[in-house]
Amino acid sequence: MSSLAARLDDIRTRMARAAQRSGRDEVGMVAVTKTVPTAIIAEAITLGLKTFGENRVQEAWPKIEVFPAVEWHFIGRLQTNKVKDVVGRFKLIHSLDRWRLAEALQQEAQAQELQISVLIQVNLGGEGQKGGISPVELDDFLAATTDLPRLRVEGLMAIPPYTADSEEARPYFREMFRLFNNCRTSGREMKLLSMGMSNDFETAIEEGANLIRVGSLLFGR
Ligand SMILES: *Cc1c(COP(=O)(O)O)cnc(C)c1O
């Protein structure tokens, strides 16, 4: 077994156990391929991985050209002048973090006559350097997106403040799940909660994540 295969096996086992502990069923994984060369991505595809994430448009493009048949997600901060390079190429944008970006996505999707699926990035910790909608603005933001018919809001995404111990992130994940449920109970179709990375994905799943984004642990970087 290759080392990538072994790491993938280990992550899948840990995901399944965490899902079992929390009584959740389907948890998906985005394999984050920033800085990962195409040869390794090719191996990941042969191992059955189908969903890949990139946080830079420039780096993602050549990879998407080589592997157009798998699903690509955009997970990084998106400049409005890059929107035209993202719409139509990525299946899901995890990082809708401001109103101006929502409008730019709507405009480009309209021009390309496409629907575009997005997650709203929530900035729960109120960290100034991080993008995202604050929890108190979330309801209004969501309501406003109904005026953007090309956008399909599929859920929420979060990046907790970095902590060495994933237990410290648990209350953060729990609060995100509460927000997610609130959005859902107001009659909206929100199905994805994207949170959890290499160092805290089990905690995230235990608290309700159903889409995790794993890079370094999977690719050994
Ligand atoms: C890099 C990145 C990840 C993956 O992080 P790892 O710690 O390498 O698993 C997840 N989400 C975002 C937004 C990232 O930029």
Image: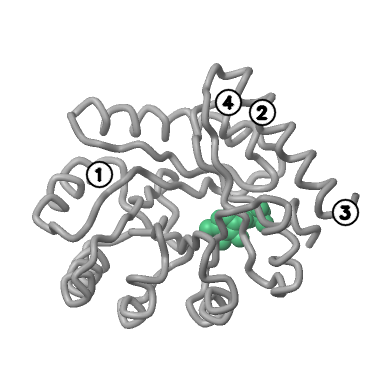
Mark whose residue sits in front, 1 or 2: 2
Q: Are marks 4 and 1 in contact (CB under 8 Å)?
A: no
**Circle 2 SS class:** helix
Q: Which residue is mark 4?
A: 206
Q: Choose between 113 and 221: the one closer to the eye.
A: 113
Q: CA distance from mark 4 to mark 2?
A: 10 Å
Q: CA distance from mark 1 to mark 3?
A: 42 Å
Q: Are marks 1 and 2 in contact (CB under 8 Å)?
A: no
Q: Are marks 3 and 4 in contact (CB under 8 Å)?
A: no
Q: CA distance from mark 3 to mark 4?
A: 27 Å
* Left or right, residue 2 beside residue 21: right
- Sequence-wise first label, 3 or 4: 3
Q: Amino acid at mark 4?
A: Glu
Mark whose residue sits in front, 1 or 3: 3
Q: CA distance from mark 1 to mark 2?
A: 31 Å
- Sequence-wise first label, 1 or 2: 2
Quarter of the rendering containing residue 41: bottom right
- Sequence-wise first label, 2 or 3: 3
Residue density around tag 1, few if under 14, some if 14–19, many if 20 or more, within 10 Å: some
Q: Are marks 2 and 3 in contact (CB under 8 Å)?
A: no
Q: CA distance from mark 2 to mark 3?
A: 20 Å
Q: Which residue is mark 2?
A: 16
Residue density around tag 2, few if under 14, some if 14–19, many if 20 or more, within 10 Å: some
Q: Give the farthest residue toward the right.
A: 1
Q: Which residue is mark 3?
A: 3
- Sequence-wise first label, 1 or 3: 3
* Left or right, residue 136 beside residue 162: left
Mark whose residue sits in front, 3 or 4: 3
Q: Position of residue 71 (x, y in %)?
A: 50, 59
Q: Position of residue 114 (x, y in %)?
A: 23, 66
Q: Residue at (33%, 27%) from the top-left corner?
A: 181
Please tell me whether residue 58 is drawn above or below residue 220 in the rendered image.
below
